[in-house]
């Protein structure tokens, strides 16, 4: 879908140039908008992602779809060497400005610019949903991870309580785009956000996809009642 740069949003077939342009358009206010729309929960989701990775000082961890580096920065608190990669130059430039100490590189999740088995752990936060071939991205993450290395996927998921699920879906489809109009630099992108969350596989279905892509010992844990799920796995 092509609109003016300000109104750019991706369609659900997630063509990489549309996705990158859409994130270029939200980059300037990305961190703030996230915190507002998640009622501040994003910080605890990031801490939980770091804990689930079980990082040790000196290990190498890759954060794919790192955006402004907000997820990468959290990983570095473990003492591991954390590097981020992203498709959107706008997000990377915003990250370079606000977090000059965080190593961020341009890179596509489907063709990562790293050798086989380069990392002890890999992670992807709120980005796997935006890649147009989930299985290929999971296989590419496995390629750059050493045997026995860990994966954590942090992604929006399906709330487990039916009553809460109804309230949440209503927030997602009605209130979230309205709030985004007040705070975001590209509100249309948040309509895509709501639609892409609704179309995303639930916890068990995502676990099956991870298991089919070269990962073993797949497990998940719900955060905020399943608004977000952390899927963990080990490189077979
Ligand atoms: C919602 S942001 C998440 C940023 C950050 N990880 C966080 O937790 O806030 C999704 C990011 O995924 C990136 N992305 C989407 N498709 C990608 C791909 N194929 N390869 C690399 N990054 C991609 C986007 O450019 C965007 O910066």
Image: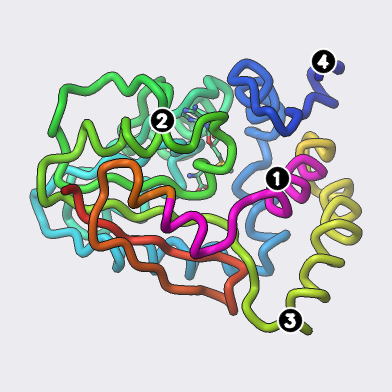
| Disc 1 target residue | 196
Q: CA distance from mark 4 to mark 2?
A: 26 Å
Instruction: Indicate which label's residue lies in the foreground, 4 or 1.
Output: 1
Q: Tell me which numbered mark, 4 or 2, is placed earlier along the sequence.
A: 4
Instruction: Indicate which label's residue lies in the foreground, 1 or 3.
Output: 3
Instruction: Please give the name of the residue rendered at 39% of the width and 66% of the height, measured from the top-left corner.
Output: 47
Q: CA distance from mark 2 to mark 1?
A: 18 Å
Q: CA distance from mark 4 to mark 1?
A: 18 Å
Q: Tell me which numbered mark, 2 or 1, is placed earlier along the sequence.
A: 2
Q: CA distance from mark 4 to mark 3?
A: 36 Å
Instruction: Indicate which label's residue lies in the foreground, 4 or 3.
Output: 3
Q: Which residue is at the front of the view, 152 or 38?
A: 152
Q: Could you tell me if the residues under marks 4 and 1 are in contact, i.e. CB atoms within 8 Å?
A: no
Q: Could you tell me if the residues under marks 4 and 2 are in contact, i.e. CB atoms within 8 Å?
A: no
Count all numbered tags in the image, as a single digit. Answer: 4
Image-based side of 128 in relation to 193, left or right: left
| Disc 3 target residue | 162
Q: Which residues are magenta?
A: 190-208
Q: Secondary structure at mark 2?
A: helix
| Disc 4 target residue | 2
Q: Tell me which numbered mark, 3 or 2, is placed earlier along the sequence.
A: 2
């Amino acid at each position: 879908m092509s609109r003016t740069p300000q109104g750019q949003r991706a369609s659900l077939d997630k063509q990489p140039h549309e996705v990158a342009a859409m994130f270029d358009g939200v980059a300037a206010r990305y961190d703030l908008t996230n915190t507002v729309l998640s009622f501040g929960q994003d910080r605890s989701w990031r801490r939980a992602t770091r804990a689930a990775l079980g990082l040790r000082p000196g290990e190498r961890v890759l954060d794919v779809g790192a955006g402004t580096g907000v997820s990468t920065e959290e990983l570095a608190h473990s003492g591991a060497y954390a590097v981020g990669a992203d498709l959107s130059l706008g997000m990377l430039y915003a990250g370079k400005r606000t977090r000059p100490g965080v190593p961020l590189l341009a890179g596509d999740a489907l063709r990562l610019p790293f050798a086989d088995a380069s990392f002890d752990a890999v992670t992807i936060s709120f980005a796997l949903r935006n890649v147009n071939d989930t299985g290929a991205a999971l296989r590419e993450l496995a390629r750059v991870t050493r045997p026995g290395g860990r994966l954590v996927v942090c992604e929006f998921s399906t709330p487990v309580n039916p009553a809460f699920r109804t309230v949440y879906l209503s927030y997602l489809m009605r209130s979230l785009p309205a709030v985004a109009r007040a705070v975001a630099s590209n509100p249309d992108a948040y309509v895509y956000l709501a639609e892409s969350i609704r179309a995303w596989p639930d916890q068990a279905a995502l676990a099956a996809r991870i298991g089919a892509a070269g990962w073993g010992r797949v497990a998940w844990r719900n955060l905020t009642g399943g608004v977000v799920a952390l899927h963990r796995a080990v490189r077979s």
